[in-house]
Image: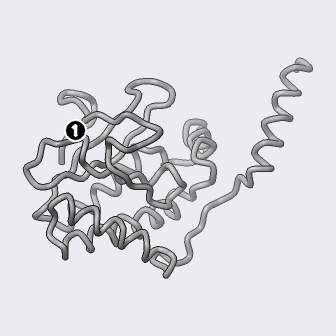
Amino acid sequence: MSIIFKRVLLILLLIFSINGCGSVNYANLHTIEDNPKISKLTKMLIELGGNPNEARELAVLAVSHSKELANEYHLVSPPLYHNFLVNSGKRKRGLCFHFVEDLTKEIKSRNFKSFDFRWGRANADKLNEHNVIVVLKKGSKDFKNGIILDAWRHSGKLYFTKVKDDPEYNFVPWAEGDRRMATY
């Protein structure tokens, strides 16, 4: 092993230990601390044009099920380190598209009438590709005003914003014919 390789390895180990790489475990899937987040997401979903009861149900589901998936995946933080564990075979699931698949499955089981759900994708086929669920008003094609549901970005703590307001990614709809379905 070269001296440079050993130094890089040591630096990476120090970074991960300083950042507190550790398992994420959400003992409670819905806590009092979640209420402001659920209220804000509910309001955004109503403004999108959703039925208020469905908006609240979707907000609670998205926040709590994101945590449930993090527990199921035995997620570690930061998310990029968890990606390394999945890609090296140490974990089975927990990449961003796993969150999209599994959260979408749960959402579809509820049969929401006032929303459509699309697969959002940024940096297609690149190392930093990222996938999310985008919520649209039923029948809408206005993707940029849709709301991102991103359970991966903060290790199971749901991140959401309008597509056009995301400071980190420029999401586009997954194109028809790609390896994953673009609509649900």
Q: Is residue 126 above or below residue 31?
A: above
Q: Nearer the viewer, residue 55 or 91?
A: 55
Answer with left or right where residue 52 lies relative to residue 79. Answer: left
Answer with left or right where residue 122 lies relative to residue 109. Answer: right
Dividing the image into 4 quarters, which one contains the N terminus? top right
* Residue 140 in the image, given as x and y percentages of width and height: 11, 47
Q: Nearer the viewer, residue 140 or 102?
A: 140
Q: Nearer the viewer, residue 53 or 178?
A: 53
Residue pictured at 61% horizontal, 43% vertical: 85
* Residue 43 in the image, given as x and y percentages of width and height: 28, 68
Rendering quarter of residue 126: top left
The secondary element bearing badge 1 is classed as loop
Residue pictured at 28% horizontal, 62% vertical: 44
Q: State the scheme by which the image is colored.
A: one colour
Q: Is residue 125 above or below residue 91?
A: above
* Residue 107 in the image, given as x and y percentages of width and height: 25, 62
Residue pictured at 40% horizontal, 47% vertical: 98
Residue pictured at 29% horizontal, 34% vertical: 172
* Residue 16 in the image, given as x and y percentages of width and height: 75, 45
Number of marks: 1
Question: For the view shown, which residue lies furthest in the right direction?
Answer: 3
Question: For the view shown, which residue lies furthest in the left direction?
Answer: 139
Look at label 1 and name its amino acid: Met
- For label 1, the crowd category at 10 Å Cα-Cα, with few meaning under 14, some 14 to 19 and many 20 or more, is few
Residue ID for mark 1: 181
